[in-house]
Image (tube, rainbow, N blue to C red):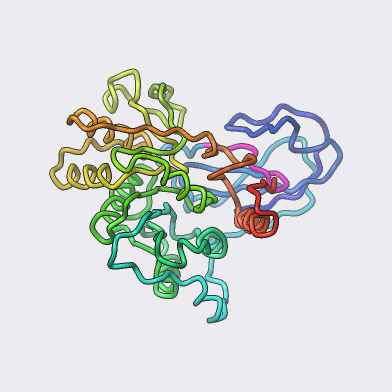
Amino acid sequence: MANVTANKHEDESRPKGHANFGGSFAIIEGEPFTATLWAGAEGFHMTVNGRHETSFSYRERLEPWSVAEVKVSGDLELLSVLANGLPVSEVVDMASVELMKAPPLSKKPIFLLIGVFSTGNNFKRRMALRRTWMQYEAVRSGEVAVRFFTGLHKNDQVNMEILKEAQMYGDIQFMPFVDYYTLITLKTIAICMFGTKVVHAKYIMKTDDDAFVRIDEVISSLKKSDTDGLLYGLISFQSSPHRNKESKWFISPKEWPVEAYPPWAHGPGYIVSRDIAKFVVHGHQERTLQLFKLEDVAMGIWIQQYKNSGQKVNYVNDDRFYSEGCDSDYVLAHYQSPRLMMCLWEKLQKEYQPVCCE
């Protein structure tokens, strides 16, 4: 991660990427600003003055921990740079650890399992979740279980740190492979396995470690939905494969020959019912599951297989699942830094309203 403090000399067009204009420019000519560039699961992300502005995909086969130098170009007067490399566990008093330690898994059926995609060096993000939405009463009481699904790291120091973290908080499930973007679909299968074989969850949710989840609202919405055949989230009903090789979502005709995807829910957060999760696990064990490198689309493909087997599917679209940032009345807000996580949580505690902090 790099924090860059600079002055902007003159107006320029914004860099290409998934930019969040929000009706105004992120910087003002002649005024200092702080930009944070960080590596995520899918690519580099940049925030300016705390607001997510743009994202860029990695070059093919580039892994974020191999990056030794980052260049930010433009007509800027650089004031200061702060670079942050491999994380180290912070010192936490034992009283705080007890408050954040995962409750024991219930032997009785639970309402919801939330599987969080994370990577070994994202300690600060996991701590932010433990201090915020993982403090909902539904989580502390055991009605909802939350687990981080994390692969191994190429750096032994990071692996040792995350092992100590797992022993301390009891909420990390290790995957038996080094984290690569092309393997994250295996985490989805692992979440389904955990939710159907380790715990008896009525619903299974997948989310990311930079997403803020309003668990109370998720529970309320699920109780209004059908129990079986459910896919709930921000659903894309009409989408097609990206054939541009420069796209991080590039899919070759060999990988997916059809020019349309079945309905799928955007990856920052979606929920499936137990019967669909069991279908995914069974298909994986019987090797009838069609694997696909885009994790969220893969779930849509598996649900289509479930539907083709004669089962009914209930697609519930909710625009309050924001995959590109935060908006008022959110159920899920994506691209939230640890600082923004704390801010969102404080606003919920004080104002009892889902108000964004950007």
- Residue at left offset 67%, top offset 46%: 356
Magenta stretch bounds: 48-56
Q: Is residue 113 above or below residue 53?
A: below
> Is 78 inside the magenta-drawn segment?
no
Could you tell me residue 223's position as x and y percent? 41, 46
- Residue at left offset 24%, top offset 43%: 280
Q: Residue furthest top?
A: 259
Please indicate whether residue 33 sits to the left or right of residue 96 in the image: right
Please indicate whether residue 81 sits to the left or right of residue 268 in the image: right
- Residue at left offset 56%, top offset 45%: 333
Could you tell me residue 9's position as x and y percent? 83, 36
Q: Is residue 237 above or below residue 334?
A: above
Viewer-proximal residue, 245 or 287?
287
> Is 51 inside the magenta-drawn segment?
yes
Viewer-proximal residue, 35 or 109?
109
Q: Residue furthest bottom?
A: 94
Q: Quadrant of the N terminus?
A: bottom right
- Residue at left offset 25%, top offset 54%: 196
Please indicate whether residue 1 sits to the left or right of residue 226 in the image: right
Viewer-proximal residue, 123 or 330?
330
Answer yes or no: is residue 272 visible: yes
Q: Quadrant of the C terminus?
A: top right
